[in-house]
Image (tube, rainbow, N blue to C red):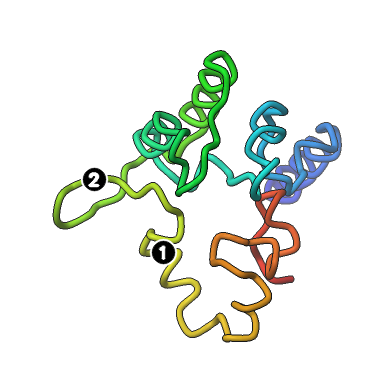
Amino acid sequence: MKKTIVMTAMIVAMAMMPANTWSRDRGVKDELTKTECGACHMVFQPRFLPAVSWTNIMSDLGNHFGEDASLDEESRTKIEAYLVKNARKKEFKYIGNGTQPIRITEIRWFKREHRNEVSKRAMKRAGTMANCVACHKGAEKGQYDDD
């Protein structure tokens, strides 16, 4: 009986929560980040990399993976602050020089998730492993399950 009352109370409490509480949208919420980063590529969720990685990426936008992605200092600072605030909480454990990755595709879990999964045909369609939306239609909302 007690268990039934607790379960009923939980269901009622959940029903009273705002609809967006249950949203599966874990995408980027900052409009400036979406606009500036999204002008050239998919906007990656900050949770993929630790703060030090985002700081390193944002410190050299003149050479952003071979492209000039320079921004005015105010925009750069705001975007970096958003990325750092929402970054992965723990740094990755790496053997060697101890640096943190600046490419999401360099991360072990990324490699493990995609090992033996991406065909030559899919890779040709995507163009690059960083083009998540080519295979994961909900990637921009932070949804990577293949449902």
Q: Residues within 10 Å of mark 1 (few under 14, many from 20)?
A: few
Asked if residue 20 is positioned above or below residue 135 in the image, the reply reads: above
Asked if residue 122 is positioned above or below residue 57 in the image, the reply reads: below
- Label annotation for residue 124: none
Task: Tell me which amino acid carries mark 2.
Answer: Thr
In the image, taking residue 10 as reference, residue 40 lies left or right, namely: left
The residue sitting at 36% across, 35% down in the picture is 56
Residue 47 or 83: which is nearer the viewer? 83
Estimate the x, y position of residue 67 in percent, counting from the top left.
Answer: 51, 44
The residue sitting at 38% across, 60% down in the picture is 106
The residue sitting at 71% across, 43% down in the picture is 6
Estimate the x, y position of residue 44 in percent, counting from the top left.
Answer: 58, 46
Estimate the x, y position of residue 68 in percent, counting from the top left.
Answer: 52, 38
Tags 2 and 1 touching, CB below 8 Å? no
In the image, taking residue 82 as reference, residue 29 lies left or right, namely: right
Q: Residues within 10 Å of mark 2 (few under 14, many from 20)?
A: few
Which quadrant would residue 14 be assigned to in this image? top right
Residue 42 or 26: which is nearer the viewer? 42
Asked if residue 84 is positioned above or below residue 126 in the image, the reply reads: above
Judged from this view, the residue extending furthest toward the left is 96
Which residue is disc 1 drawn over?
Answer: 109
Which residue is disc 2 drawn over?
Answer: 99
In the image, taking residue 87 as reference, residue 94 lies left or right, namely: left
Estimate the x, y position of residue 124 in percent, counting from the top left.
Answer: 63, 78
In the image, taking residue 110 as reference, residue 41 lies left or right, namely: right
Q: Secondary structure at mark 1?
A: helix
Residue 134 or 8: which is nearer the viewer? 134
The residue sitting at 24% across, 52% down in the picture is 93
Task: Tell me which amino acid carries mark 1.
Answer: Trp
